[in-house]
Image (cartoon, rainbow, N blue to C red):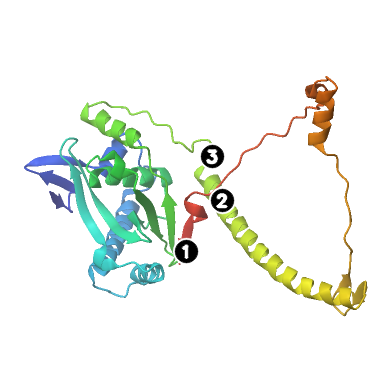
Amino acid sequence: MHFDEATHTYTRNNQVYISVTTLLKKYGLSADYSGIPPHILAQAAAAGNAVHKSLENYILGTNDGSDAVKLLDQYVVNRGIDLKKAKSEELVYDDLYKVAGTVDFQYEDGGENIIAEFKTTSKIHYDAVTWQLSIYNYLINKGDVLAYYFKKLKVFHFTKTNKLTVKDLPLIDFDTVKALLDTHAQGKDQFVYTPAHSIISDTEERILADLITERDKYKEVIQQLETKIDDIVNVVKDKMIKQDIHQHLTDNLIYTYIGPTTRTALDQTKVKEYITAKGDKVEDFMKTTTTKDGIKVSPRNGGKKSETF
């Protein structure tokens, strides 16, 4: 496979392969930059290419000291990533569909195989990059459905304010990716795709995910604090019992000893047995109530949605 960077063209055995980004644009799955002046796009592309080159060189062993490299280096060190096992700018392709692309970064983290894309745009178009990485995943695994689901996707977003945010992305279903490739191979002009998260906007989803992650972090911290509080309070309680003290005042707190209480509750099992023994139906004594509906929202991947450096 040969890639001509100037024309962004992939060729193999004298045949031109469509790039993944061109394929996505063909079917309206890429980011829309139609409203941005060409000279602005050209400047952004040049700046993005320079960052990509620095990051590629860093992964291959050369550190030019640029801001983006410093950020990626901090991430690599913090995560304990072995760059000797990593891949940078690998050309991947499929001879059946005549599709090709270049994968920015592949590495292992905590036993997981990661496929990552570097982005330097002002905002992340999550649908587009999820599609891009999912197709790369298909190409890397040569259409092996089992291997496909054993990869994780991440986007590395380098901002102009010198920050790096790394976010997990969902895998698009294997059959959906294959359906897109089949649509292209059959020469069809349209591909119908409904994003799984179309019920919520990208912005709302990111905010909700971040809030849930923060909430869960605080829950864990609060639980730890409650445990420490209980340990100290139990020591105080034992002293108050031994000294027969029911209330103790300090400058900061009031300690009030509350003795054990006995609660009486209806034994539902015995009541049901009694009603049945009398020949009545338990259902006749039941009350039906309707609870409020709702949605349970849980973070993917153990709650680890993003990391910022």
Q: Quadrant of residue 13?
A: top left
Label 2 or label 3, whichever comes before in sequence order: 3
**Separation of disc 2 and disc 1 at Cα?**
15 Å
| Nearest the eye: 64 or 296 | 296
Q: Would you name the residue on which mark 1 appears?
A: 308
Q: Amino acid at mark 2?
A: Ile
Q: Is residue 31 visible?
A: no
Q: Is residue 184 visible?
A: yes
Q: Amino acid at mark 3?
A: Ile
Q: Would you name the residue on which mark 2 appears?
A: 207
User: What residue is rendered at 34% in x and 66% in y?
Assistant: 81
Q: How far across and how far down the image is residue 154, in percent?
A: 38, 54
**Separation of disc 3 and disc 1 at Cα?**
24 Å
Image-based side of 213 in relation to 291, left or right: left
Tell me if mark 1 has few (under 14), some (14-19) or many (20+) residues whose alpha carbon lies within 10 angstroms of its own.
few
Q: Quadrant of residue 219?
A: bottom right
Q: Secondary structure at mark 3?
A: loop
Q: Amino acid at mark 1?
A: Thr
Label 3 or label 1, whichever comes before in sequence order: 3
Q: How far across and how far down the image is residue 151, in percent?
A: 34, 49
Quadrant location, the C terminus: bottom left
* Residue 62 higher or lower than 13, as above or below: below
Q: Secondary structure at mark 1?
A: strand
User: What residue is rendered at 60% in x and 42% in y?
Assistant: 296
Q: How far across and how far down the image is residue 115, in percent?
A: 32, 53
Q: Secondary structure at mark 2?
A: helix
Tell me if mark 2 has few (under 14), some (14-19) or many (20+) residues whose alpha carbon lies within 10 angstroms of its own.
few
Q: Would you name the residue on which mark 3 appears?
A: 200
* Residue 178 higher or lower than 229, as above or below: above
User: What residue is rendered at 45% in x and 66% in y?
Assistant: 161
